[in-house]
Image (cartoon, helix red, strand yellow):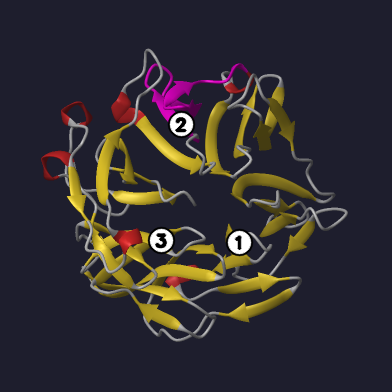
Amino acid sequence: MFRRAAALTFAALALGTAVTAPAATAADACTWTAHSIAAPDGYLAADVDIRGTDSHGSYSGTVSDRSVNMSRVVLWTGGKPDIPDALAKFVYPSVADENSAGTVLLDGGSPSAGWGVYLFSGGHLGPGTLTRLPDPPGYQLESAVGLNDRGDVLASATDLKDGHRVSVLWSVLAAGPRIIDIPDRFGLDLDDDGTVLLRAPDNQLGGLWRAGVVTPLTGEDRPVLIRQIRNGVVVGTAIDSWPASRALAWHGPADPRPLEQGGTAEATNKHGLIAGSLTNLIGPAAVWQDTRLLGRLPFPDGGDADVFVIGDDGVIFGNTSNAPAALRWTCD
């Protein structure tokens, strides 16, 4: 899930491009550094797209296979990319998420396994195990959405009676899947406690679903691009008028807080690290701790990117919009 970025050729990336974040404490006194991400042999680094991380140095995503005009699933372990044999023949796969155990959530299909939603576990340690999630009775799974650290899974599905869309939650605390069928509300993300972030049509504010109870998000009357939830905090972007926007973090359903000089808020982790853009929808990429601005994220040759993934280890992943060309930032 990119909204902005200047053109950047991946081949021109220079490792070690850095900026020092303003520091209020010793913990903040680090330097953000941009790193390129290697593609598997035979593929282009410009076609890499990162979608998940285990927050322990490994991550996952896809690389475009231009010979067949679709993607291949890739796992990076110790910085080295690998296309797992179990996923090599998947047709039009899409990686949705990865949790701290290194389990990857994806959707797609293959000649031997029909289209569906899958978990791939153990792939950073060996050949891995592929598990297809069963379609709930009366529904057909369509796409993977989210996976949390305790192993809960969120997916979208179609009601076979009339074709309307629902969300499906598998919780490790429940015996079977829970169907979340709320008009004009669809699961967008999944918190570690099982809370589902709901989105609404036409960029309206959605809400939070937990144990069958829906709590609306409030406090903003402009269109809002809601993005993620972690540790109870929701991040998103209020759209004033193109390109004017404001980055917000909801610390409660009715408690949106503006990010210092924030234009957009695209991703967050459980420690309150947030990445997005400064000033407006097309501003330079930046990083915050809660609502406090830490500084800009560096880009070789002055490029820019959107941010998709922040690990709980503080590593940030993003892509430029024109390639895409993946970057990894560390704060050392």
Residue mark closest to the camera, 2 vs 3: 3
Q: Main secondary structure of the magenta part?
A: strand
Q: Which mark is residue 62?
A: 2
24 versus 112 height, above or below: below
Residue 305 place in picture, x, y as percent: 26, 48
Residue at x-position 19% and y-position 45%:
18
Q: Residues within 10 Å of mark 1 (few under 14, many from 20)?
A: many
Magenta-highlighted residues:
59-85
Quick check: marks 3 and 1 in contact, CB under 8 Å?
no
Q: CA distance from mark 3 to mark 1?
A: 15 Å
Left/right of residue 217 with respect to residue 20 in the rendered view = right
Amino acid type, residue under disc 2 in the picture: Thr
Residue 127 place in picture, x, y as percent: 65, 19
132 versus 148 height, above or below: above
Mark 2 lies on a secondary structure that is: strand
Residue 28 place in picture, x, y as percent: 31, 60
Q: Residues within 10 Å of mark 2 (few under 14, many from 20)?
A: many
Tell which residue pokes out farthest to the left in this image: 301
Q: Is residue 80 magenta?
A: yes
Residue 203 place in picture, x, y as percent: 43, 70
Residue at x-position 59% and y-position 70%:
184
Tell which residue pokes out farthest to the top in this image: 42
Labels in figure, total? 3
Residue nearest the viewer, comparing 185 with 324: 324
